[in-house]
Image (spheres, rainbow, N blue to C red):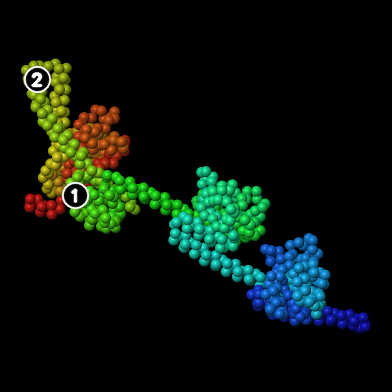
Amino acid sequence: MTENDLDKLRVENIALREQVQHFSAFKNLILATATILDLSALLTELTICIADMMACKRVLIFMVDDEDATLKFGAINSDPTAKQSLRNLSITIFNAENDPLIRSWLAGETVLLDSESMAAIPALKWLADTSTLDALYSIPLIFQGQLIGLVLCDNLGNASDSNLSIVAEASSIVLQNARIHTETVEKSTAGMHELYILRQIDRELNDNIDLNHVFSMTLDWALRFTNAQAASVELYDEQTDELRMMAQYGHDVGIDSELAMRLMLGGIASRVARSGRAEVIPDVSMDADFVRVSTGTRSQMSVPVIREDRVLAVITIESRKLNGFTDPHLDFVEKLASRAAVAIDNARLFAETKREREKLSHILSNTADIVIVCSMDDRLVLINQAALLALRLYASENYLGRPFFEVFSHTTLTDVYRKSRLSGEPTISETILPNDRIYHVNITLQENVGCIIVMHDITPFKEMDRLKSDLIATVSHDLKQPLAVMNGYTELLMMHKKFDPTGMNFIEMVRKSIHNMRQLIDDLLDLGKIESGIKLDYQATPIQSLITDCIESLRPTVLTKNMALTAEIPVDLPPVHADRARLQQILTNLIGNAVKYTQPDGWVKVNAEERDTMLRITVQDNGMGISPEDQIHIFDRFYRVRRPETDSIEGTGLGLAIVKSLVEAHNGQIGLESRLGEGTTFYLLLPIHRQEDSDLESTA
């Protein structure tokens, strides 16, 4: 082996030893700092390790602040008391194009700074002056091509290329790990803090429905989170495209509120209200729509308050800093706006509901009709002034929430109410109240509300009706005598003279007219008796035999029209508590009408079933049906359905009025369901005969 070969081996051995030392030093630096994830503690430990490794007396580390594009002081290995004065030390790096030193750092080049170089940078000049340093060794820390920090050493010491490489590479790795950890922890902490704040905001907004409080609280939280100096909330009217300022904080320009409002109408907030999209203006001087209402404003953020795709308001926040609002600020205010939207909508709905309740209360207080509302458990929900007067209740006492039967136990209203609740169907009745007036009672069941009772004073109408009944009874009685005379002379004519077919037709027409007139008079008298308070002979009346008798009496007409008349009556039905003759009159009329108004070859069905304490009887046909307009008046006296197909059907228009009066006299109910061309169903509800009814009859 030659001398040259030996020299070559020696050089290679030296290089290998340097590499081993390099990796050993790199390993030691990593081991000493890699487990430290707290950025502040890591920076301090790094300065100590670098000082030992480079044999430096003083080591400083600066970290890059991406938001401000500066290198800010991080740590120093000596003189802990100097940290406070160094805390605000920073080096601007955004002007790299015009500064060769910054370009070198960004390129990852280590630079030796002499006194002249340091004098050009205010922070380093101050450091050199206060520390009597003539030169500083600057080592940029680069991670994945990005400058993340800078190491400054006060002398060369062991600043070999190998050591510089170790410092730059190892420090960059551990610092980046710590930065990521710190940012993750800070984001997590900030997220938890934001969740806590949002939960607190939710509680405060949900606990209050006052609009002014919602506005002021929204501004308070927005200012607190963004560290802004001024804020406002403007309600937006989409119809007029106008903003109306509802609350503001920090507007210190010397203008009146009316002028401020007019100025805001054409500004950025108005633009946001129209678009429905939030805007962050980093520099308001660059926006032509900006209107100044606060001195010193340099940046602005406007966020729409949206509810169901409709802009309700705009939150505007102003800062004295350029680019004063970050993405987290915008995200928080948007979340705040979504919560404010719900609160504003709730407050608006509450205000509208309150106004409607006051309006309803005013209407109910001034109406002459009695209005009572009960819950599903029979407790009073509403009672108006007219009800208190008519039912002789104390105006000063609060009856809401009390049981219906307890409050009205001294009135006949409880019987009507109990009957309605048992049947489960709308009830129309009449009753006399403690003020000795007669009232028309209408009870309806409303889902999710309860029972609604409306009562109208019909005493004057009853008096008029009584007078009319007396008149009809008198006139009807006086008409019977001339009708009897007319009928008698018609029979005498037929006995003493022979008439040709034409004459006989005339005679028959006269006799038919006399018969119809007598029938009308009988119906009028019957109706007058019923309405004046007819006495009914109540007894246990089996419904099966009664319906069978009615059907048999109508059988000839049914056969003539080739119709099907059937009855489905269970054999175990209990008897009803009724006057048999009058009940037969009711059923004959209803079944007869069904046969009369059903076309030939049609059908009529009669059914009966037990329902709690009532018996429900239905008479159903597939006839011509009744229109909704006619159904309203079908139980009125003298009312007849006027259609071409009914012109040939005879009747007085009193049959159903008599039926209704008789049913109500039996403490029952009658109703109907019908559609034109599809037929009609009349239903009756009659009380079932009870043992106590028989006991009362025997006692009487």
In the image, residue 402 sits, relative to residue 136, either above or below, namely above
Residue visible at 69% across and 66% down in the picture: 65
Residue at the limit of the structure toward the front, as seen here: 254
In the image, residue 651 sits, relative to residue 133, either above or below, namely above
Question: In this rendering, does residue 378 appear at all?
Answer: no
Residue visible at 16% across and 28% down in the picture: 516
Given the image, on which type of amino acid does mark 1 rest? Pro
Corner quadrant of residue 124: bottom right
Given the image, on which type of amino acid does mark 2 rest? Met
Image coords of residue 154 (percent x, y): 78, 77
Image coords of residue 129 (percent x, y): 77, 74
Q: Nearer the viewer, mark 1 or mark 2?
A: 1
Question: In this rendering, does residue 116 appear at all?
Answer: yes
User: 39 or 490, which is in the foreground?
Assistant: 39
Disc 1: which residue: 434
Numbered tag placed on residue 494 in the rendering = 2
Q: In the rendered picture of this protein, how many numbered marks are placed on residues?
A: 2
CA–CA distance in space, label 1 to label 2: 62 Å
Q: Is residue 690 left or right of residue 278?
A: left
Image coords of residue 686 (percent x, y): 19, 47
Residue visible at 10% across and 31% down in the picture: 477
| Label 2 element class | helix
Q: Which quadrant of the rendered structure holds the N terminus?
A: bottom right
Q: Earlier in the sequence, mark 1 or mark 2?
A: 1
Image coords of residue 695 (percent x, y): 10, 54
Please rate how many residues cluster around mark 2, counting C-alpha atoms within 10 Å: few if below 14, some from 14 to 19, many from 20.
few
Residue visible at 19% across and 33% down in the picture: 557
User: 21 or 460, which is in the foreground?
Assistant: 460
